Each structure stands twice: as C-alpha cells, then as structure tokens.
Amino acid sequence: MHDLIIRGGTVIDGTGCAARKADVAVSGRQISGVGTDLGEAHAEIDATGLLVTPGWVDIHAHYDGQLTWDPHVTPAGWSGTTTVVVGNCGVGFAPVRPDKHDFLIQLMEGVEDIPGSALAEGISWEWETFPEYLDALDRRSFAIDIGTQVPHGAVRAYVMGERANAMTAEPDDISRMAEIVRQGLEAGALGFSTSRTDLHRAKDGKVVPGTYAAKEEVVAIGRTLGEVGHGVFQMAGDYKPEDVELGWMKELGRTIKKRILYSMVQSSGDRDQWRRLLKAAADDAAEGGFLTPQIAPRPVGLLLGFESSVHPFFLHKDFLALQALSVAERKAALATSDVRAAILNNPPDYAAFEGLLAMLTTGFDQMFPLGKIPNYEPAPEQSIAALAREKACTPQELLYDIMSCEGGGNLIYLPMLGYVDGNLDATSEMMRHPQSIYGLADGGAHCGLISDASIPTYLLTHWARDRTRGARIPIEELIENQTRRTAQCYGLYDRGVIATGMKADINIIDYDNLQIHEPVMTYDLPAAGKRFLQKITGYHTTMCSGQVIYQNGIATGNLPGKLIRGPQAAPLSQSLSVSEAVDAPVYFVD
C-alpha cells in the first residue's frame, strides 16, 4: 500500500513529453507509481483539474546566510521550489577566518543587497572551513533541499588576506586555494563559483576578490572539479576581452569535462553580445565542449518605491530630510500636499547625473507602473514618459502620485537588463536555445530593489499562459527546463521528473488561477531588515521528499529538506547512472 496517491491530475512529468492524465503514488521519500490502477494508499489528494509537476529546481540563489536562521528558506517554497543551489557569483560565508566575518558580510551586502545588519545578527558562525559550513547546514532541517558551491571571493580572502583584491596570486596562493576548493567538493559542494564582472562590488566599493584573477588561477582551481570528478564551474562575467575569456572557458571545460555555466543577459551596452555568447556555446557543444549559458526568463528589473533602496526621489533634499522618520511616519508625511510640493519643486541638478543615476532619476521612457498584477513585459505606450504626456503632467508628478498611493500598485518597474528592445523576444530566443539553462532568479538577494524568486512561477503564468506581445512557449518545455534540466546540470539525477523511483518533490498547481502578486516591502529579516516579498496563489500542494511542505500557500511546518552532498544518482528504475550523470552534457540527456 502506498503512503499517498495523487489522483486525477494532469501530469507534466519534466521530460518534455506531452501532458497526460495519470495518478501519482508516493511511498516514503520516493514516487512509487505513475499511471492508473495504482491500488490503495493511506491518504489521497484529489487533483482533478490541477497540474501535477516535479518541484522546481532553482540553481541560482543567495540564501547562504539565511539558511542559518530560516528553515523555510522563504520565499523559495512559495513559488513551488523544492531544491535551491546557493554560493553563486563567487560570494558566500565559507571559508572564513574568525576575524573576517564582517568582511564577508560587507561583500555580500554590496554585491547582493542583503542588509548587513540582518546578516550580522542572523548568522550563527559555527564554522571556519567550507566542510565545517556544510556540517553546520547538515545539522539543520529545511523545508526544501539545499545545494552549495565554494565561492571564489571567500576562498581568496581566506588564503590571501589583505591581498585578496590583488590581480595576481602567487603560486603558493593558487595551490592553497585549489586545495580548499578540492576539500569543499569532496565534502559535498556541487561546484565552484567566481565573479568576473565590474558590476559586483562590495559595500566598500571594491570588486569581488578574484574578479581580475589571471587565467592561471581560475584554470588551476577549475581543474580540481575534474580531479574530484564532479561539479559545475559557475561564473558571472563581462567577458572582456571576449575571445580571451571564452578561450580559457572552452579549454577548461574540455579539460575537466565539466560544465562551465556562465551568466548571460541582454545589455544596452552591447546589444548583440548575447548572440555571440550563444553562438560560442553552440559551436563549443558541436565539438564536444561544455559551455552553458545561464539565462534569466524575465528582465533584471528594479522595483522603485519610497521604501526601496533607491528610487527617482532618493537624492531630493526634501526626501532625505524624512529619512530619520519611521516607515509609518515617512509614509504619512509623503501623503501630504506640503511634502509633495517641496520634493517636486526642489529637485537636484539632474544634468549632473550620468549613467545609472540618470536612468534612476530621469529615465522615464524606461520606467513603467508595475501594477497590482505585475506586468514584466510592458509596452512603450505604458511608460511613465508616455503616460505623463497623455495626462498632461510632468513625469515626476506622475511618479510621485503612483509611488505614494495607498492600497498597492505603488511600485515603478525599471528593467535594467534583458529589455533593450522593449519586449521579451530576445529572452524567448535565449530560453529556447538548446544549450541554455534557466536561472538568475537570485532568491534571497537584492532585498531592497528586486524580487525575482518568483521566476519559476512566471514561466507558467507569462510564458505558457498569458503572454500577448509575442509567442508563448509550450508548458511542457518550460517545466522540463525548470526541473530535469536544472537538476541534471548540477548532477542531481534523483529529482526533476515524475517517474517511479524518483524523489517525491511534487507540485500540484491550480494552473488557471495561478497568480504572482505585487511585491511588498517587508521588515522581517533579523534586525528588522527589509526585503521585497511576493505572494503567489495557485499552488495547491508542494511536496519535498514525500512530505507536504506547503498547502494552499501556507507552510505546514514539515521540514524534510536536507543538505545535498555531491551529485545524486538516478534510481535503479531509471536508465542513467551517476557516472553518466556527471559527465553528459545536459542538453543531450534523454
């Protein structure tokens, strides 16, 4: 007898195959049957009219510190995510010397906009080495499963100390760093991560340690993945000079026969770089290589409101005068006509602003009301500039009135990356490329400006169901890309598919009523730290390892999630062995 049978649902199993009516049985931590006439069970769920899918596998998150205080890893599970991978972009909290806690906190705060006060109060430092960090996580239980990566920035700081930001590491430094990464992988890390972009800067303004590291350093560290026999080499970069960066990336991937997973977005600074990077991956794959672009299924966009870290009025002196007030007092003041007039009538010298500052304060053609039901693919005629012309008011007046309105709908959306053409056609092309992998949701990060942990749900609501400004994508393809393909990218062959013997990570979804709601600033982090949180409705049930962790959006209190140590083999009932799992390019796996 099974523990549970989910009856009458429409199964989209994660393989890319067409949706079908089937029952799904669960026993213990595994799926024990899929089909009809499965017999009896101790409990049943009626899934008539609902979708049954694998739980989402989110490979790009930054819950590294939050894991020590939040067993629910909020808000990952709200969006149906049952596995996350942390330690991305070269930042994390291990290894760390006892006197360098503050250094890693300000690094994470600067790069990922996680309040330093929350990290300082919330993290319980029970480790120095990376294996000790894994042991600390292993002592905990979570709602979902956790995978980790060894971050270059922390490793370099541990080995090189005050020289961490030096461009050149000494041979002994490189040997020691490689050994630390080896120990982390052997203890169970799923990969190594590094940042090679000028955009990633610590709170003190310095780049992430390792940003300018020489080829000899990153290749020597990368080779440990091949020597240990598993792991992904994850990186964010500017890829300049492009031929040099892609050259060592290709060489490393083919040497170690492991995936080189690099972040890729469309940027106004180089509108066609993404096409070149996609072509490089396709050419490399044709020659047996391992270049794998990681793409974002919606724009990297800022949420601008009066409680955001920055917004169009954050440099106005009359707004700065309100900063000492409480959130409630400031909100009340902003609603008065006197404060409105003072802020609007005494602007800073906009002409002195350039680049990002100019975009944040006067980029009205690129700003859009987000709405109570968020619109992440707005049309040009919905911009603040266009709406202000229509209403015969200034853009600043319109912005102020939207941002100060009560009852929601008071956020402005400023897509920074991935929206150069004013639509998501380029994103669609990236998503459907055979070498690309979905990611960059950044759960746990960018707390005061971005809320993209809902991206897995956005795949269904926007790309499969609601898109009107371009072609939609078949739901079976989307689900495969957020389950089996993301799981296998990191060597996790025990999950991501609804099939007998696979891990019972399952979503039951009311697809017709699935809805992402507007982000709301919440002060629930340690030390009353702030973050945007985004409620989602329509998930009937989310299960991890056979236990229900969310029911209609409410946490059940079950904590079946664990630390993942190393690659996970497919069950014997599935055809792929762990040795095949580690080395096979994910886009060829069937």
Image: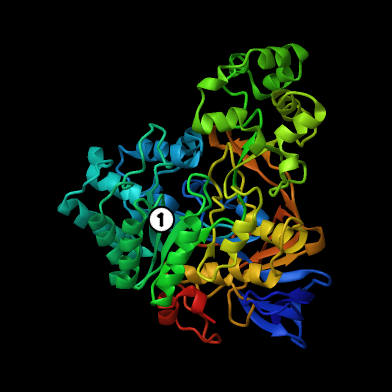
How many C-alpha atoms fall within 10 Å of the one at disc 1: few (<14), some, or many (≥20)?
many
| Residue visible at 79% across and 77% down in the picture | 7
Residue 61 position, x and y percent, is 52, 53
Query: Is residue 216 something that shows in the picture?
Result: yes
> 508 left or right of 424?
right
The image quadrant that residue 565 belongs to is bottom left
Element type at marker 1? strand
Looking at the rendered structure, the number of numbered marks drawn on it comes to 1
> 90 left or right of 476?
left
Frontmost residue, 535 versus 545: 535
| Residue visible at 30% across and 50% down in the picture | 155
Say which amino acid is labelled 1: Met
The image quadrant that residue 103 belongs to is top left
Please say if 447 is above or below 77: above
Please say if 89 is above or below 566: above
Residue that numbered label 1 is attached to? 235
| Residue visible at 33% across and 60% down in the picture | 184
Frontmost residue, 312 versus 66: 312
Frontmost residue, 122 versus 108: 108
Query: Is residue 521 something that shows in the picture?
Result: no
The single residue placed furthest to the right in the displayed view is: 49
Please say if 110 is above or below 136: above
Residue 168 position, x and y percent, is 21, 46
> 169 left or right of 282?
left
| Residue visible at 33% across and 72% down in the picture | 254
> 108 left or right of 447?
left
Residue 370 position, x and y percent, is 72, 41
| Quarter occupied by the N terminus | bottom right
Residue 182 position, x and y percent, is 29, 63
